[in-house]
Image (tube, rainbow, N blue to C red):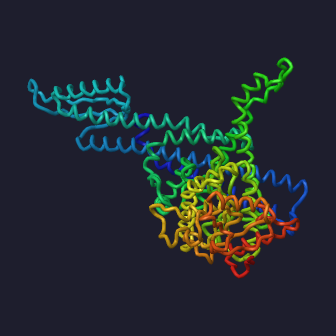
């Protein structure tokens, strides 16, 4: 880039282009939502449990519509990256243009002339030498580049030497205008240099922000999108540095205030560049967190699929003869050491992602509302928080906390429980907006012996408490009020709720209102670390519990085991009368049967009683 080009440059044109890409991205996002939540929902619409549209043609239409939704989603993500890149380019060019304009203004103020090549001409001035006023002249500036923090920098050292020589020349030059002209010419050269650097940095980055020439978004495309995000984020540090980051370790209210204080463009840029941060911030709107986590979900799924595909096949033979005995082959032992654990993790995580996608695809089925992915992390045992219906605008919200052995690979059943809770609650109160949330955002005990310790629940308590606080903050921001909220804990999940009720943070409410929930349900609870509901700050009239099976059942072993190892309070568990809550009627025969429906989709008594609490129909709850 030269002086003439920079002089005529209009950074606003790049910002206009960025705005155009943002508009296209927003349209693509809306189109994705329309396809998933309206068109596909209509195709999946059911009557009496049967799809209205069936057959090969309907199945083919669903497949193509899903691909179309994926294309729109990819377009949304890439357009957001292009918009951020263009805004960053405009930011850097404007900074250079401002430097140039300021230098030219200073030149004009001193009656200097700036040439078409950026050189600076200065007039005669100074004390006469041999009877003559020192003549004027023309100088061309030089850019110094950008200094770095490296301890050894030859370029910087050369620049320092050049500066010293220029100062010396200016001091001995008979025309005082010479030094001033050189300084202005250098500023002009530096501005041109900065603009050139911005152009050379962003031109190749922008060229890479394009999809391949087919109509299918494959895993490679999502992996490329993640790479693109890293490239743009790295290049846009200066521009993004102007966007106020979220408060460090902020509470939900602070997070919400931060988000509210950003402009629409800043919000879009922050989601695009930091989806992992935005997706996990309690207090932000559900649709914002969903947008961020959907991008993470697609990128992680592509990454995991690619890694799984690239793991070498298990070598054969697995066993070889060793004398009269058989042993593992050396090749197989080496493979197991390198790949078996990683392959098992990838396979499990991909199964969980498949379950999440299945829930996305069920939107509209039997009136099932849009799903909101409020947290997603496939590392270790994984983290998933998924809502059926928007909790920010719901009249009734129910949050289900699963228990022991929960992990991403087996999340399908827990997501289905959230669905059945929504379906029955909606059936009981069809005129109300309802949201049911499967909340798995903690390290659950991976086996029964580990579930005898409270340490997992104690560690999980802050996350649950802060999510509930964030849900309330987001709801108040959206509606000006609060939803009727029910928290349901299954098995060890109820222990987590007990610890969350006792948890105190810098922003927690008073002891008389420790948990931002109206009702608490404990199903098959081994104990809530309290002798009475009131000890947890829970109104006994709004504490509910249920049990399954008789003596010797798996549910009985969980409850009595918890009583004996101290998860209860002085041996008291929620289904004991002395705990102080209501014990609801249950027809479940086993520990996992509280959410069953029969072959005709009729709800069990256990499920119906939970739904009655969720919608506030306390008089309809049947008790033991």
Residue 17 visible from this viewpoint:
no
For the point 72% across and 65% down, the residue is 369
For the point 74% across and 67% down, the residue is 547
Depth check: 10 or 259 in front? 259
- Farthest residue toward the top? 323
Place of residue 287 in the rendered image (x, y in percent of width and height, measured from the top left): 61, 60
Place of residue 474 in the rendered image (x, y in percent of width and height, measured from the top left): 55, 65
Place of residue 619 in the rendered image (x, y in percent of width and height, measured from the top left): 71, 82
Please give the count of numbered marks on the rendered protein: 0
Q: Is residue 275 above or below residue 113?
A: below
Left/right placement of residue 534 relative to residue 308 reads left
Q: Quadrant of residue 480?
A: bottom right
Q: Is residue 602 above or below residue 7?
A: below
Quarter of the figure with the C terminus: bottom right
- Farthest residue toward the right? 55
For the point 50% across and 50% down, the residue is 15
For the point 63% across and 44% down, the residue is 379
Depth check: 266 or 479 in front? 479
- Farthest residue toward the bottom? 619
Q: Is residue 197 above or below residue 33?
A: above
Quarter of the figure with the N terminus: top left
Place of residue 585 in the rendered image (x, y in percent of width and height, measured from the top left): 76, 74
Left/right placement of residue 135 relative to residue 490 reads left
Residue 70 visible from this viewpoint:
yes
């Amino acid at each position: 880039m030269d002086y003439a080009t920079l002089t005529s440059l209009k950074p606003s044109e790049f910002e206009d282009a960025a705005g155009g890409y943002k508009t296209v991205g927003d349209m693509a996002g809306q189109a994705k939502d329309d396809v998933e939540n309206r068109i596909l929902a209509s195709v999946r619409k059911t009557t009496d449990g049967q799809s209205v549209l069936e057959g090969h043609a309907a199945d083919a239409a669903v497949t193509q519509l899903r691909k179309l939704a994926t294309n729109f989603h990819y377009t949304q993500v890439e357009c957001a990256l292009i918009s951020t890149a263009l805004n960053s380019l405009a930011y850097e060019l404007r900074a250079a243009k401002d430097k140039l304009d300021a230098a030219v203004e200073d030149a004009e103020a001193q009656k200097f002339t700036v040439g078409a090549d950026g050189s600076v001409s200065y007039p005669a001035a100074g004390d006469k030498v041999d009877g003559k006023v020192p003549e004027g002249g023309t100088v061309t500036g030089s850019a110094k580049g950008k200094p770095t923090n490296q301890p050894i920098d030859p370029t910087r050292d050369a620049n320092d030497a050049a500066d010293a020589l220029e100062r010396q020349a200016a001091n001995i030059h008979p025309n005082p205008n010479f030094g001033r002209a050189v300084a202005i010419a250098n500023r002009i050269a530096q501005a041109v240099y900065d603009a050139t650097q911005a152009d050379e940095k962003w031109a190749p980055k922008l060229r890479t922000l394009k999809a391949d020439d087919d109509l299918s978004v494959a895993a490679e495309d999502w992996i490329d999108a993640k790479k693109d995000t890293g490239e743009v984020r790295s290049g846009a540090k200066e521009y993004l540095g102007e966007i106020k980051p979220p408060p460090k370790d902020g509470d939900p209210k602070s997070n919400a205030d931060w988000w509210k204080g950003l402009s629409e463009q800043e919000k879009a840029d922050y989601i695009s560049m930091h989806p992992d941060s935005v997706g996990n911030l309690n207090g932000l709107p559900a649709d914002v967190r969903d947008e961020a986590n959907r991008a993470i979900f697609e990128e992680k799924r592509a990454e995991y699929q690619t890694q799984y595909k690239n793991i070498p096949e298990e070598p054969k033979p697995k066993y070889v003869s060793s004398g009269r005995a058989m042993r593992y082959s050396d090749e197989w032992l080496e493979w197991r050491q390198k790949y078996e654990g990683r392959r098992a993790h990838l396979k499990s995580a991909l199964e969980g992602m498949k379950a999440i996608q299945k829930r996305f695809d069920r939107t509209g089925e039997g009136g099932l509302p849009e799903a909101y992915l409020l947290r997603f992390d496939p590392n270790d045992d994984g983290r998933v928080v998924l809502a059926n219906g928007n909790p920010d605008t719901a009249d009734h919200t129910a949050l289900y906390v699963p228990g022991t052995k929960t992990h991403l690979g087996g999340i399908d059943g827990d997501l289905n429980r959230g669905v059945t809770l929504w379906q029955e609650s909606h059936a009981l109160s069809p005129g109300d907006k309802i949201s049911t949330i499967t909340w798995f955002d903690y390290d659950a005990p991976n086996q029964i012996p580990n579930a005898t310790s409270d340490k997992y629940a104690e560690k999980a308590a802050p996350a649950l408490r802060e999510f509930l606080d964030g849900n309330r903050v987001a709801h108040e921001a959206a509606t000006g009020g609060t939803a009727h909220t029910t928290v349901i804990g299954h098995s060890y999940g109820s222990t987590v709720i007990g610890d969350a009720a006792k948890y105190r943070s810098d922003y927690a409410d008073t002891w008389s209102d420790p948990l931002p929930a109206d009702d608490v349900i404990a199903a098959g609870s081994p104990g809530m670390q309290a002798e009475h509901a009131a000890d947890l700050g829970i109104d006994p009239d709004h504490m509910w519990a249920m049990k399954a099976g008789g003596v010797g059942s798996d549910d009985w072993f969980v409850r009595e085991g918890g009583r004996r190892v101290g998860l209860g309070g002085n041996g008291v568990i929620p289904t004991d009368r002395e705990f102080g809550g209501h014990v609801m009627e249950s027809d479940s025969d086993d520990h996992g049967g509280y959410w069953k429906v029969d072959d005709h989709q009729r709800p069990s008594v256990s499920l119906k009683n939970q739904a009655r609490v969720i919608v506030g129909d306390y008089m309809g709850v049947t008790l033991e």
